[in-house]
Structure formats: C-alpha cells, structure tokens
Image: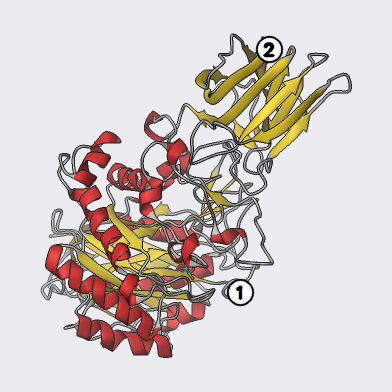
C-alpha cells in the first residue's frame, strides 16, 4: 500500500507566485498565421517573391495585366505594391490564399482594410470571400476610388463557415488600380481590438492563468545570422511601418520547409506586453546578446561593437517602465498605454554557450547593475540540461552574479521520471533556476513522430513535483513550444494545436493548467513510501489564503492502486480532487479534443486519513481542508 505523508507543521520555502508560466515563440506559425489574427498572407507584397500567397484571377474574356510596382509606395518600409490594369471585358484581379486557407465563421464580422490608388478609368473593386469549394460566401464592391493613396475599409459577413476560404480582389470596369497593405481581421479578436489577436488562442492562455510569459523566443531571438536576429525596435509603432523579416523556421528544418513563413511583427513587443497584462502574466522578454544562433552561423558582434545591443536592452526597460514623458515611454504612450508595463526581468541570450557568451553577458551585467539593479537578469545555460557546455557556464554565472539561469531540456519521458530529484542537491546560494524550455518527447528531439501523449504529460507532471519541492531554488518553469498550426508546423510536440478555426488543448496543457491553478504558496515536506521506486511521485503545498493543503500525485502504472494520505498533526475535514488519466499513448485530436481532460472525482475521508484510489496513468490534484 502506498503511503504519502505530508508535514504541515514543517513548512518549507515560499513558492514564487510566478512559478508556472508560458513560453511563446513564433514557430509553427505561432504568430503570423496563428496568434496574430491577420488572415491575409503577404499583405504588403513584401515577401522576396512579392506574389507569394497571391494568385491571378482572369476569366477567359478578361483582358488585363498585373504587376508589382515600387514607385511612390504607401509605406517606405514596404516599398512594393500590386498594380491591376484591366480593359473591363470581364472581372480581373487576384486571390489571397491566407495562411493554409482563411478560417471564416458563418455570420461573424470580418474587417477588410486596403490601401488603394486609382490611376485611370473609374473601375470598382469587387471584394469577395470564396469557400474552399468555390462558393461565394460574401461579396461587395468598392467604388469612387481616389487618385491618391487612401485607406478603405469595410465589413464582410460570410454566409458559411469555412476553414480554407480565399479572399478575392477583382477589378470591375476598365482602368488601373494600385493596391497595398490588404488586411482582413475578424472583428471578434481578443478584447475586440482592431488588428488584434485570435480570441480563442488567447483564451486558451488566459485559461491557464500563467505566472509569466517568456517571449519572443527561442532561436528567433538569435537569428541564423545576426542580420536576421529579432530586433524589438522594429516591432513597435504603426503595423504598416514594421519591416518584414524572414522567420528562421522558414528554412531551419529541411524536412519541414515553410517557404512562406515570415515575421510581419503585427504581434510586436507592445502587443506582447499588452498580452501579458491581459492574462495576468509577468513579461519576460529575451534579447539578443550579440551572437547569432550557435546551431547556425554563430556569428559574433565584436566586443567593441556591443554597445548598441546593450543600449537596446536599456531602451526596452525605458519603453516598458519609463514615464510617458520620457523618450521611450512616450512611444509606449503613443501606442495607447501611458501606464508602465512593470517589467521586472529580462533574459540576455537564448541557448548560448562558450566563453564568447560569457564575455558578452558580462558587459550586459555591468551595464544593468549600474543602471537598472532592480531588473532580474536571466542567463541561458545552453541547449542541454547537463552537458559540458552547461557545466562550463554554471560556475561563470555564479561568478558574474546573474540572478536566474535558464535551463532547457527536450528528452524522452523516462528522463523526466528519472530526474525528479535533480534539484534536491543544487547550490542554494547561487543564482536561481528557470526551467525555461522543456517537453517530454515521445520519440526523440526534432522527430516528426513526437506526439503529445498522456505518458509525456505524466513525465512532465512528475518532474514538476520535483520543481515544486525545490521552489527555494527553482523559481519559474515553462513548457515549449506553445502553439503549432496543424498544417504548418516545424516542431512537435507543442502545448496547443490549432487549425484556422479551433484550438486543441493537449494532455500536457492540462498538466500545466492543473499546476497553475493549484500552485500553493508554501512548500510542505512530503514523503512517498510503500511503493516501487518510479511509480508514485508527489509534492504538497499550502494555500496561505484558504489554508488548504494542495497535494499533487503522479501515478505511473497500468494497474489501479490506493494511497493512504497521512497528514502529520492535522485532520482532514473535506477534500476534493481532479484527475487526468487514460491510456499512456492517448492524445487529444481535432476530432476528439477532450479525450484526455481533467475530471473531478470523490475523495473518502476515514478518520484522520484520506484513502485515495490511484487510477492507472494518472495525475491527481487533491485540495484538502483541515480541522
Ligand atoms: O522550442 C523550440 C526551440 O528549441 C527554441 O527555439 C530553442 O530555444 C530550442 O532549441
């Protein structure tokens, strides 16, 4: 019989209120084609192939020409635009395919915005939504086009739901028209913000109640070469003035190419900060340290040229926290947020290693200690959780006195089950730990066969009990990656899978959610006995407001069992539990999205003890009120 003993009279460390968070990177069409609700791909004809995503529509009687022009553009940051010329013998124009189609919901409102200039004639522009099967879902016409660039906007309501619709722009009548910055958004974005984020995807994040949001990467921070690194200053201000950048996940995996993957930065740093505020998560930006990705070029900024990188980091603090009257605070205020965003931490570098990293990091540390000692600095311990690069870096971080070290691990579930005691013997005097990227891999890292199985989720849950028990040294953790589009992913597994209309929450998501919702404030020492090693994992915490004991148990086994819960020196009076269980290989799918989901179950209290049935392959959270 398994016995789990909790010791409420011996409270341990305080648990960071921001302990369980999320990590967002624009990978797998996470931003463009995902969270950023823009439905038009290559809206400003700025991709290297300016017509990528666009197709000519020319019925047999049409006589027309299309060309990409560059004189006198609408915005200098996007110098190219489309010119349509038609003799008016039939409609003539283009269709946009969206991001693996355009997802439309019947009867919902969509706002189309275009920049237009009529060069000759008096043509009208027919705007239409076509379903995947060729049916017209909605159409209307814009007439009275002006001779100088103007912004025109209208609302469309498709008659049917379609995950793979197209947007048509067709000239009606003879003449010539220039078109740029074609944008289609659902009106029902998150908080109904024009040009905002996909409501169902943000809702999934809000439902987690994460403690922090790490952004924008990941490898995209570094860039495969330095000129392709993420530069936050290019991502603020009016959307049409943010220059396009190729996404490194466009070409990184030859086995999963995504030639149409670019960063419009419609989701930029201002929007990330706003998202953090909306979902109650502390912002954790990660900035380039003066090195390109070491898996790619490893290009280095000479130490003598590092100052602009350090200045970018200092300016980011001013943008986030400075008064609205300051230079960078004024830019934030102009975008609609005069109040500060309360930035408290900042990561310098992602998955860097070697002396080149330490040399550069040192300069950031010096500048930050002098100018912003209030900001916690996060350093990266490389891509592996225990290799020689990791061993080299940790003592250096102690010497530099960085606040927090970001450790990463992608490994088989067995690694997670076997390493629940990883932090028991960690140095308590040095920097704290942020377990910033992790996910159990059902096959192996970077395999296309990885699945979000329950077994992987249970490995992560078991490991998280070890993080919680060591909350005095581990202060934050986040699963990675966060989102993946089912038709456009590069990396699997991922916490949430989306198509153009729906979001699927994985078993791994539910593990994260159960931890977020049941964090607790103070660690309570916990012992497991009477069971074979590696089958039952547990941790406990006290909710300091309600006084409840929150017990988390992972049962890894095919047979049902029982656990006696013994509470040292206190008596349980009421308990409730939720359980995530099923077949170890089970996943949630678009057809069966709730196959693995947490369910409440009864708890029996017998005298001073709780007797808890342990379902096979289960993660259980029990909240216990005591006398
Ligand atoms: O999460 C996917 C990638 O894994 C991240 O970009 C990188 O930091 C890690 O190698």
Q: Assign the N terminus to one quadrant of the image.
A: bottom left
Residue in front for this viewpoint, 473 or 139: 139
Look at the numbered disc 1 and give the secondary structure of its residue: loop
**Residue on which disc 2 sits:** 123
Check the image and report above or below for 371 versus 280.
below
Give the image quarter of residue 340. top left
The answer to whether 31 appears left or right of 422 in the picture is: right
Check the image and report above or below for 435 versus 235.
below
Image position, residue 524 (x, y; %)? 19, 72
**Residue on which disc 1 sits:** 443
Of pointers 1 and 2, the one earlier in the residue sequence: 2
Does mark 2 have its CB less than 8 Å from ligand 1?
no
Residue 340 makes an appearance in the image: yes
Residue in front for this viewpoint, 8 or 512: 512
Give the image quarter of residue 585. bottom right
Q: Nearer the viewer, mark 1 or mark 2?
A: 2
Look at the numbered disc 2 and give the secondary structure of its residue: loop
Check the image and report above or below for 129 versus 393.
above
Image position, residue 238 (x, y; %)? 39, 36
Residue 133 makes an appearance in the image: no
Q: Are marks 1 and 2 in contact (CB under 8 Å)?
A: no
| Crowd around label 2: few <14 · some 14–19 · many ≥20 (10 Å) | many
The answer to whether 241 appears left or right of 246 in the picture is: left
Residue at 53%, 40% (x, y): give it: 78
Residue at 57%, 63% (x, y): give it: 491
For marks 1 and 2, give the CA distance: 57 Å
Residue in front for this viewpoint, 96 or 64: 64
Image position, residue 193 (x, y; %)? 39, 31
Q: As drawn, which residue projects farthest toward the right?
A: 60
Check the image and report above or below for 414 versus 213.
below
Give the image quarter of residue 345. bottom left
Q: What's the colour scheme?
A: secondary structure
């Amino acid at each position: 019989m398994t016995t789990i003993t909790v010791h409420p009279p011996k409270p341990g460390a305080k648990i960071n209120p921001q302990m369980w968070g999320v990590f967002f990177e624009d990978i797998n069409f996470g931003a463009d084609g995902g969270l950023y609700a823009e439905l038009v791909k290559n809206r400003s004809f700025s991709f290297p192939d300016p017509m990528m995503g666009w197709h000519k529509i020319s019925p047999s009687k049409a006589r027309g020409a299309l060309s990409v022009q560059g004189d006198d553009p609408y915005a200098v940051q996007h110098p190219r635009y489309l010119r349509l010329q038609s003799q008016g013998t039939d409609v003539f124009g283009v269709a946009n395919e969206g991001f693996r189609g355009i997802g439309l919901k019947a009867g919902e409102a969509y706002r189309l915005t275009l920049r237009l200039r009529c060069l000759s004639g008096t043509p009208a522009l027919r705007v239409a939504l076509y379903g995947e099967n060729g049916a017209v879902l909605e159409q209307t016409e814009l007439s009275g086009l002006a001779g100088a660039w103007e912004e025109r906007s209208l609302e469309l309501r498709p008659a049917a739901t379609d995950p793979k619709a197209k947007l048509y722009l067709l000239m009606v009548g003879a003449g010539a028209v220039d078109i740029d910055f074609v944008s289609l958004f659902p009106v029902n974005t998150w908080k109904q913000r024009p040009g905002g984020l996909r409501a169902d995807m943000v809702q999934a994040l809000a439902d987690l109640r994460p403690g922090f949001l790490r952004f924008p990467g990941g490898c995209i921070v570094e860039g495969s070469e330095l000129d392709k690194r993420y530069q936050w200053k290019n991502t603020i201000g009016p959307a049409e003035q943010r220059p396009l950048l190729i996404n490194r996940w466009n070409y990184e995996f030859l086995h999963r190419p995504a030639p149409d993957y670019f960063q419009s930065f419609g989701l930029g740093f201002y929007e990330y900060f706003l998202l953090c505020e909306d979902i109650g998560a502390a912002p954790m930006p990660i900035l380039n340290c003066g090195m390109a990705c070491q898996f790619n070029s490893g290009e280095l900024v000479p130490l003598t040229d590092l100052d602009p990188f350090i200045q970018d980091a200092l300016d980011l603090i001013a943008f986030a926290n400075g008064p609205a009257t300051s230079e960078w605070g004024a830019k934030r205020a102009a975008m609609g947020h005069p109040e500060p965003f309360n930035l408290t931490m900042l990561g310098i570098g992602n998955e860097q290693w070697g002396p080149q990293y330490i040399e550069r990091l040192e300069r950031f540390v010096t500048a930050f200690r002098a100018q912003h000692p209030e900001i916690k600095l996060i350093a990266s311990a490389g891509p592996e959780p225990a290799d020689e690069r990791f061993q080299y870096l940790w003592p250096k971080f102690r010497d530099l006195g960085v606040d927090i070290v970001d450790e990463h691990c992608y490994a088989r579930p067995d690694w997670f089950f076997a390493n629940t005691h990883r932090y028991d013997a960690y140095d308590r005097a040095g920097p704290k730990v942020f377990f910033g990227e992790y996910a159990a891999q059902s096959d192996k890292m970077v395999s296309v066969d990885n699945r979000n199985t329950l077994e992987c989720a249970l490995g992560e849950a078991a490991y998280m009990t070890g993080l919680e028990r060591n909350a005095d040294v581990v202060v934050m953790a986040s699963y990675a990656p966060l989102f993946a589009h089912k038709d456009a992913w590069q990396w699997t597994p991922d916490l949430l899978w989306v198509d153009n209309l729906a979001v699927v929450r994985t078993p791994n998501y539910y593990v994260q959610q159960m931890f977020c919702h049941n964090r607790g404030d103070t660690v309570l020492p916990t012992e497991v006995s009477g069971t074979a090693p590696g089958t039952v994992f547990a941790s406990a915490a006290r909710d300091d407001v309600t006084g409840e004991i929150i017990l988390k148990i992972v049962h890894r086994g095919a047979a049902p069992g029982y656990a006696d819960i013994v509470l040292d020196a206190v008596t349980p009076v009421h308990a409730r539990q939720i359980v995530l269980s099923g077949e170890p290989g089970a996943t949630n799918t678009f057809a069966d999205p709730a196959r693995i989901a947490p369910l409440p179950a009864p708890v029996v209290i017998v005298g001073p003890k709780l007797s808890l049935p342990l379902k096979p392959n289960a993660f259980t959270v029990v909240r216990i009120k005591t006398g």
